[in-house]
Image: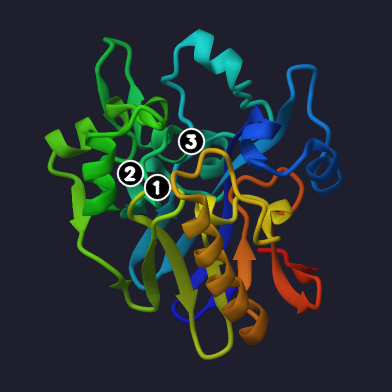
């Protein structure tokens, strides 16, 4: 899809699974299983790690990087990491791009399933940036939170995913909302984690939003459907309501980072609330 100066594509980095109850918080399983699926024998639901690839204006930009390949075997099994369908390497090849050609990586936040692919382990055991010529961009509030997490979310942050970026002078720390590249804006939200940045790409005709874990799947469109992982669920609900109101009124396209079945779509609003309107191919 072409928007302004850019060509936008989804970019698959691999599949994984998380506990369905954790993904839907206080929503009973009898309800969320109708909106998504029932899960496996361990109650894990199918998830994907979907990035956004933005090309144009002299840049090749990747938004988020998935889980990567550094995770210990025990954790990889718990999260059921699976690269048989897609991986960073496969997607780069399918788009005709080398890691060296990526100019920028925008990190919505620093949870392992969003930043794990930002670095890689090489044969001698060292961990280095995956994209050696890229500048990585993250909000200062999120970096500070990740470096001093709470007991609730500590397991989601793995310093090996960003420390090599800092050591190599490749982490650009952003201070607030605004335009990061021409036609590309970031908007901070706080319900899921402090300083998560929602990505907006727009021109006079189209507007794509990449809300990351604010709306991780199409099944999370209903405002009360917030994750147990969210630090501040009431804030998440307020932020979702505001974004979905704008999306439904202005025809925005929402890209769902973790939905294994629906990549993107528009939003409609009825007396029952917000729901998926039309599925959109990106």
Residue 193, numbered circle: 1
Q: Nearer the viewer, mark 2 or mark 3?
A: 3
Question: x and y percent of residue 96 in the render?
Answer: 52, 49
Nearest to N terminus: mark 2 or mark 3: 2
> Which residue is rendered at x = 52% and y = 51% of the image?
233
Q: Quadrant of residue 139?
A: bottom left
Q: CA distance from mark 2 to mark 1?
A: 30 Å
How packed is label 3: few (under 14 Cα within 10 Å), some, or many (20 or more)? many
Is residue 94 among what the camera can see? no
Front-lying residue, 105 or 185: 185
Q: Is residue 272 above or below residue 31?
A: below
Left or right: residue 242 compared with residue 134: right
Q: Secondary structure at mark 1?
A: loop
Q: What residue is pinned by disc 2? A: 100
Q: Residue furthest bottom?
A: 204
Q: Nearer the viewer, mark 3 or mark 1?
A: 1
Nearest to N terminus: mark 3 or mark 1: 3
Q: What residue is pinned by disc 3? A: 113
How packed is label 1: few (under 14 Cα within 10 Å), some, or many (20 or more)? many
Nearest to N terminus: mark 2 or mark 1: 2
Q: Quadrant for the N terminus, please.
A: bottom right
Q: Secondary structure at mark 3?
A: helix
Front-lying residue, 137 or 87: 137
Q: Is residue 192 above or below residue 112?
A: below
> Which residue is rendered at x = 75% and y = 76% of the image?
268
């Amino acid at each position: 899809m072409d928007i302004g100066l850019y060509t936008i594509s989804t970019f698959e980095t691999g599949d994984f699974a998380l506990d369905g109850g954790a993904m839907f918080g206080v929503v009973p399983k009898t309800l969320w299983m109708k909106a998504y699926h029932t899960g496996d024998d361990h109650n894990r639901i199918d998830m994907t790690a979907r990035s956004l690839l933005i090309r144009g204006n002299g840049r090749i930009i990747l938004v988020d990087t998935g889980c990567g390949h550094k995770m210990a075997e025990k954790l990889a099994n718990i999260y059921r990491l699976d690269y048989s369908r897609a991986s960073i390497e496969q997607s780069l090849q399918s788009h005709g791009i080398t890691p060296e050609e990526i100019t920028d990586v925008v990190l919505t936040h620093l949870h392992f399933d969003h930043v794990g692919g930002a670095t890689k382990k090489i044969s001698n055991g060292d961990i280095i940036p995956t994209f050696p010529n890229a500048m990585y961009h993250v909000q200062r509030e999120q970096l500070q939170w990740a470096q001093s997490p709470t007991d609730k979310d500590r397991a989601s942050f793995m310093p090996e995913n960003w420390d090599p970026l800092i050591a190599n002078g490749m982490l650009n720390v952003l201070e607030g909302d605004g335009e990061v590249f021409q036609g590309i804006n970031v908007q901070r939200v706080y319900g899921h984690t402090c300083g998560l940045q929602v990505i907006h790409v727009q021109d006079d005709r189209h507007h794509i939003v990449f809300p990351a874990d604010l709306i991780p799947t199409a099944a999370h469109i209903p405002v009360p459907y917030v994750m147990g992982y969210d630090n501040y669920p009431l804030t998440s609900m307020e932020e979702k309501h505001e974004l979905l109101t704008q999306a439904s009124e202005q025809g925005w396209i929402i890209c769902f980072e973790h939905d294994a079945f629906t990549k993107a779509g528009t939003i409609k609003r009825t007396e029952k609330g917000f729901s998926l309107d039309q599925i959109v191919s990106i």
